[in-house]
Image (cartoon, rainbow, N blue to C red):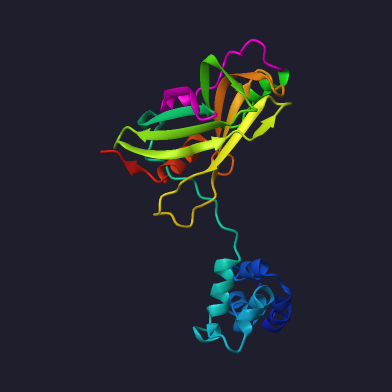
């Protein structure tokens, strides 16, 4: 191949190629590699992608003869997908403290072991709508706390929720939800929603605006009437769709020692 395509032809063709095609040509043979690695070719490709790097005020070109090739090859490739590291926490290390208020009066309190919140509501409560039945059996990742006996609330009142989580391995506590109000009622879906932005540890200053949603599962959602709550759902739709993702998220909360 080296004998059949002269270098002059390659020098005429290579400037017409895209970066990934030019990089592939470098793998053909020594001649192709020498021509394809030409400073001018890669400076033109970089100028199309980042015009500012060709500025006379910049010093990129003075770094090395291969600076444009290195810049293009390192930053134009799609990042490789990386598997999430295994979390150090397990659900067995956790304990959840759930409280619900109505007009500042406590109406529901429970402590739920971490392993329990992973369980879905398997038996359909009597009287739920078909929409709710579809909701509780869909594949969306969420944590669930069954409310038994059922809780009666009036959504016209100020209904709020708090949720703490305790680490049993080192006796630290983090706040997931701090008296967030159930301000949005999905009457068709028989859900009342509250949300809060997670309090992330200062060790992760660039991680922010991650929401946790809390939903009350209602038998009905008539306005002005008392609603029967048979379950509470926790959802982290912005970041967590598996156990491992959620545990990694919980690890970076702003944990406080209670010793």
Let me know if residue 137 appears in the view: no
Determine the image quadrant of residue 91.
Answer: top left
133 relative to 169 in the view: left or right: right
Q: Was residue 169 drawn as part of the magenta stretch in this picture? A: no
Q: Was residue 124 drawn as part of the magenta stretch in this picture? A: yes
Q: Position of residue 216 (x, y in %)?
A: 59, 26
Q: Is residue 64 above or below residue 104?
A: below
Q: Position of residue 58 (x, y in %)?
A: 56, 85
Determine the image quadrant of residue 202.
Answer: bottom left
247 relative to 209 in the view: left or right: left
Q: Position of residue 150 (x, y in %)?
A: 55, 15
- In this view, the residue in front, 107 or 104, is 104
**Can you say which quadrant of the picture contains the C terminus?**
top left
**Can you say which quadrant of the picture contains the N terminus?**
bottom right
Residue at image point 71% right, 72% down: 17
Magenta residues span: 103-129
């Amino acid at each position: 191949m080296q004998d059949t395509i002269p270098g002059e032809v390659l020098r005429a063709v290579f400037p017409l190629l895209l970066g990934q095609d030019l990089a592939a040509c470098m793998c053909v043979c020594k001649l192709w590699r020498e021509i394809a690695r030409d400073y001018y070719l890669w400076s033109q490709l970089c100028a199309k992608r980042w015009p500012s790097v060709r500025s006379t005020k910049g010093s990129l070109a003075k770094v090395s003869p291969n600076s444009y090739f290195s810049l293009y090859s390192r930053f134009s490739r799609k990042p490789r997908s990386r598997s999430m590291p295994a979390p150090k926490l397990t659900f067995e290390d956790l304990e959840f403290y759930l409280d619900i208020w109505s007009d500042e009066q406590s109406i529901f309190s429970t402590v739920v072991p971490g392993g329990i919140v992973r369980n879905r509501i398997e038996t359909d409560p009597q009287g739920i709508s078909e929409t709710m039945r579809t909701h509780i059996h869909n594949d969306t990742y969420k944590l669930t706390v069954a409310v038994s006996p059922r809780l009666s609330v009036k959504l016209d009142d100020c209904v709020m929720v708090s949720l703490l989580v305790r680490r049993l391995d080192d006796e630290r506590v983090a706040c997931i939800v701090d008296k967030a109000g159930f301000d949005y009622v999905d009457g068709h879906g028989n859900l009342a929603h509250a949300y809060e932005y997670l309090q992330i540890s200062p060790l992760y200053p660039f991680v922010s605006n991650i929401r946790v949603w809390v939903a009350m599962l209602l038998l009905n959602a008539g306005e002005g009437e008392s609603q029967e709550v048979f379950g509470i759902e926790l959802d982290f739709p912005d970041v967590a769709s598996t156990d491992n993702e959620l545990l990694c998220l919980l690890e970076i909360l702003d944990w406080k020692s209670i010793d």
